[in-house]
Image: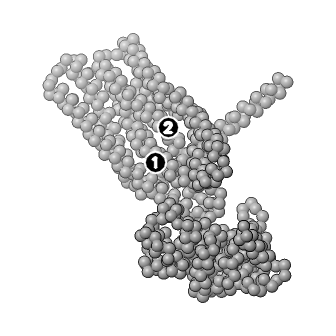
Amino acid sequence: MSATSGTDATRREDAAAQAARRSLRSLDREARAAVALLVESARPDARVLVGAVLGLAAAALLEAAGPILARMFIDDVLLPRHAEALTIAALLGGALLAGSLSSVLRYIQLARLAGLAMRSVQRLRERVFGHVMRLPIGFFDHAASGRLVSRVTNDTEAVKGLYVQVLFVMLDSLVILAGSLAAMAWLDVGLMAVVAILLPAVAIIVFAYQRFSAPAVARTRALRGDINAAMAESAAGMAVLQASNATGRFAARYEELNSAYLESRRVELRANAWLLRPALDFLAVCLLAAIVGVFGLREFDGRLSTVEVGILYAFIGWLSRVVEPLIQFTMQFAQLQQSVVAASRVRSLLELAPARSAGQAQGDVGAGDGSIEVESLRFAYPGGPEVLHGIDFSVAPGEFVGIVGHTGSGKSTLLALLLRFHAPTSGRIRIGGVDLERLDEAAFRREVAVVPQEPFLLSGTVRENIDMGRGLDPARIEQALRDAQAEGFVAALEGGLDAPLGEAGARLSTGQKQLLSIARALAGAPRILLLDEATAHVDSDTERAVQRAILGLRGRVTVVAIAHRLSTIQAADRILVLDHGRLAETGVHDSLMRIEGGIYRRLVELQRIEARTDASA
């Protein structure tokens, strides 16, 4: 029994050791990622950095001159009682001048470093946001918005702390430390060696702190993202939570996350309390005792003279200059470690491959004449079964094609492939006679527009929501409103095109939002317009307005409309019926209705029954 217990204990110890080694390896990778991120973002200001380091080195040398001048005053003036006014004035003036120049130099260089840090973080935040804008849609299918916002805002702000700590505290402290040790060595190498013992002692403290606190720091950062995600999710669905009496359960889940965050922070703080300032203060006291002890041993051996009293005073003065930078260095290590974790998370986000790069194709290849050809198209989501099985169809320029089918038949997946949000598993898609993957990204997005099922509006004006930063001509915006059948209700708004819509278009109905989405799509004069169940959540009047808008585009714009309400696409030139990822039926409305037991016919009859039931209710 005891042998078994000993074996289990050994296994637990081995597992704990392996976990610790994995944690340290992970932190080492994060540190390398953080340094790489710092270098990349600061590279445009490399000259500023070099100049600031040289300026700080000059300031450190000037600061180290103070104890040297004090030693000269004690050994050459005070103890020999050679009180010459000119000598005293020169020493005092030199100390005052060196201290003043050191302070001015440090202020100038730290101000330059502050500007470097702010510019670097600005570049990094813009880079992260721009990269997120180019990530494939598949990434957003799985990414929690709260965690993503935390990375773009909180983590980049934490990286600013990394710049500040590395460029301000650590760089400044290391320069002062190096200057002080050099001055000590110039006066007395033996005493400098005693003081230098402090360096490996500090390294041991930092290593111990890193080992004990690294897992807690990483867990704290992850829990902070979870807390942000829980808050964003709850705020977005507050109406549903209150209506379903789920607020208490979600509050309990939030409290659980918050408690875990608090405990993780406590682990960090316990490591800070034991291993940072108290340990270094104790080392400083031990070091002072060691210096005085060495001097005492010299007197005991008869090698101490009154000339060396000034050296003792200088070393005691330098001791604070050596210890304080180390204290500052280690006191900032907790914040540094959090910043390293944040920088690693930002770096991992930047390493995600973007969907495509503008100009990837040769030349400005766009949608051409607006034709669409789909051949033997197959697709499966990563790790999932195949959802599209050999789809074949073509759409002529200016044709209006409707796509219908049961839920899960592959309609939205097909649209996502047409929009190049995902790459087909096999088969090909041609737009304007050119393979989809060869199309230039900017030209493709300019000439292919989409109206999503859920309208997205900015918290700006009508004009800003249609323009979307494209700098469109006002006449084109007004024409887009007319084409989308939205001119009437926009004119009725106070302010017209310049009327503020509130957050997410809160002042508009769902139908009005959808009409503005259509106007936004049409304002760019696209060759192809894709509609993803654009009438699923609108009333009958809005549906008829959308129908009129679509019919008005016939012959000018290629329209592919996925429709839940089949009345929206009854006038289409052709209707494609999907069933479990396969193209089951194709034709116009009348011909499809003549197919006995056909899928399209059943869908139409089912919707008619639902309409009669709703009317009778």
Q: How crowded is mark 2: few (under 14 residues within 10 Å), some or many (20 or more)?
A: many
The residue at the point 47 percent across, 23 percent down is 282
| Percent position of residue 523, x then y | 50, 77
Image vertical order of residue 29 relative to residue 425, above or below: above
> Horizontal and vertical percent for residue 68?
29, 29
| Disc 1 element | helix
Amino acid at the residue labelled 1:
Lys
Query: Would residue 224 be found to the left or right of residue 613 on screen?
Result: left
What residue sits 40% from the left and 37% below the top?
173
Residue at position x 60%, y 59% from top?
A: 352
Q: Residue at x 55, y 73 (%)?
A: 515
Tell me the quarter of the picture where residue 47 sits: bottom left
Outermost residue to the front: 616
Query: Which mark is first along the chain, 1 or 2?
Result: 1
Residue 46 relative to residue 140: left or right: left
x and y percent of residue 591 in the render? Answer: 77, 86
Of residue 354 and residue 141, the one placed in the foreground of this image is 141
* Residue behind mark 2: 333
294 relative to 163, above or below? above
Classify residue 100 as left or right of residue 484. left
Instruction: Choose between 89 and 404: the one closer to the eye.
Output: 404
Q: Residue lying furthest left in this view?
A: 85
- Mark 1 sits on what residue? 160
